[in-house]
Structure formats: structure tokens, C-alpha cells
Image (tube, rainbow, N blue to C red):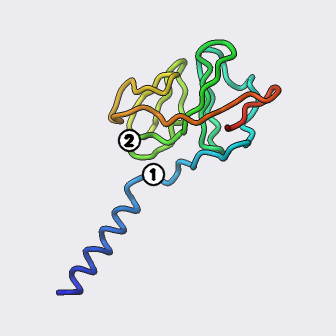
Amino acid sequence: MAGVGAAAVGIGLVAAGCSADSDSPAPAGAGTVLGPVSAVPVGSAAVFSDQGVLVTQPTAGTYQGYSTTCPHQGCEVSRVQGATLVCPCHGSSFGLDGSLKSGPATKGLTPTKVSVSGDQLTVG
């Protein structure tokens, strides 16, 4: 019977490894340059996929950062539709403040600190 237990543990590990979409990058480290502030429209957002960060500009000169990782199943939130951020995998949508607008996600996006350095957005 020891072989059955070992097989069950092995299956559990494989299943656990598949629980989140690995296409969503980990957010970039502090000091990473994301891009120019001009890339983020007022009242909307820009996705910096390579760095795993999206930046919103709800009002002129106010920038907020969030991880692109959807809290539902880990897909990358990669679509911006005006003032709505959308996960293409299952349709969860989020506001410019990272809050959940509609599921299946049950919580908002994880904040990522961003700052402006000259005309560039950086992490941290």
C-alpha cells in the first residue's frame, strides 16, 4: 500500500503545479524602469507585460501600480478597456484602483508601488 500513497502524493504535486497560469510574470523588482509616463493615458492604464506590472492614471499625474497576476487563477490581466482592466482568461474585471468590478475573481489586484523618475515610471 505504500506505493499507492506515494502515487497519490505525486499526483497532488502535479495538480498543485498546474493550479496557476505560469504565463503571468512575477512583478519586477524595485528600481526597474517600466516605461515613459506618456504610455499611461489619464483615466486609463497601461500594461507592462515584461515586468508583470500594470499602471493606472485615474487622474492627471496620479499613478498607481498593480501586479498583472489575476487573483482568480493567475492569468495575466492584459486588456485595458477605458477605465476597466480585464483578465482575458475568465473575464474578471477591475477598476483603476485595482478593485474587483466583476468575477469570477473574488478580490482585487495586488498593489505594486510605482514612482515617477523624470519622465519614466519605475517600480518602487
Work out whether residue 62 or residue 13 is closer to the camera in this orientation and state it: 62
Q: How many marks?
A: 2
Compared to residue 39, the image places residue 30 above or below, namely: below
- Indicate the amino acid at tag 2: His
Give the labeled residue for mark 2.
Answer: 72
- The residue most toward the top is 60
The quarter of the displayed image where residue 39 is located: top right
- The residue most toward the right is 118
- Residue at 40 percent across and 62 percent down: it is 17
Disc 1 and disc 2: Cα gap in Å?
Answer: 10 Å
Label 2 sits on a secondary structure element that is: loop
Give the labeled residue for mark 1.
Answer: 21
Q: Considering the image in quadrants, where does the C terminus appear?
A: top right
- Indicate the amino acid at tag 1: Asp
- Residue at 22 percent across and 79 percent down: it is 5
Compared to residue 5, the image places residue 109 above or below, namely: above
Percent from the top left, x then y, of residue 114?
66, 32
- Looking at the rendered image, the disc whose residue lies closer to the viewer, 1 or 2, is 2
Percent from the top left, x then y, of residue 44?
59, 19
